[in-house]
Image (cartoon, helix red, strand yellow):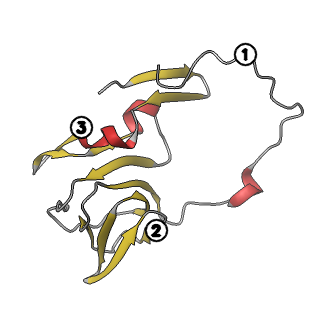
Amino acid sequence: MTTHRLHDSRNGAAYHLGGPDQWAGFALDHPRLGPMQGKAFLRPHLNLTGMEVSLNSLAAGQGIPYLHAHRQNEECYLFLGGQGEFQLDGLQFGVCAGSAVRVDPAGMRGIRNIGSEPLLYLVIQAKAGSLEQANTADGILGEHPPVWSAPEGAIGR
């Protein structure tokens, strides 16, 4: 899998981690369970300071082998492809591309793939109750429109 830094500056970072078809090649070294295929956290690549984001791919028939909760972070799951089941506090419901699920820190959650294709999803974690301004309230418009130079090539090259 080809991953590489695209940009790094005082005000941001960009990193290419490949398309969703490559996410199954990621492996998280879980401190108690050992290697877990199909999960990559973006915090170390992007130097995130107020949230954690992960890219996830569960193979057909695969599930996360444990339920979990958090001490202070709520999570938002955004499903991009495949079919799965989500379990929240003992209740199960179906998820697929376009589904979004928010879970409070104390909610016991789990996921499994019930389809024949990879279940692809993003997870965003942030401290519950920490959002002070939502939507466009936090935005500051620049005085000038962007000026674009000629394209230098496709992203990921």
Q: Is residue 58 above or below residue 44?
A: below
**Which residue is situated farthest in the bottom direction here?**
91
Reply above or below: 40 against 104. Answer: above
Question: Which residue position is annotated with label 2?
Answer: 99
Residue 25: image tag: 3
Farthest left residue in view:
33
Which residue does the image show at 47% across and 24% down from the upper left? Answer: 156
Mark-to-mark CA distance, 2 and 3: 24 Å
Residue located farthest toward the right when viewing the structure as drawn:
143
The amino acid beneath tag 1 is Ala
Dot 1: within a 10 Å radius of its alpha carbon, few (fewer than 14), some, or many (20 or more) residues?
Answer: few
Where does the image place residue 69, in percent across and percent down from the top left? 28, 67
Identity, as a three-letter code, of the amino acid under mark 3: Gly
Disc 2 residue type? Ser
What x and y, as percent, mark residue 20? Answer: 38, 43
Image quadrant assignment for residue 137: bottom right
Query: What residue does disc 1 label?
Result: 150
Q: CA distance from mark 2 to mark 1?
A: 37 Å
Q: Are marks 1 and 3 in contact (CB under 8 Å)?
A: no
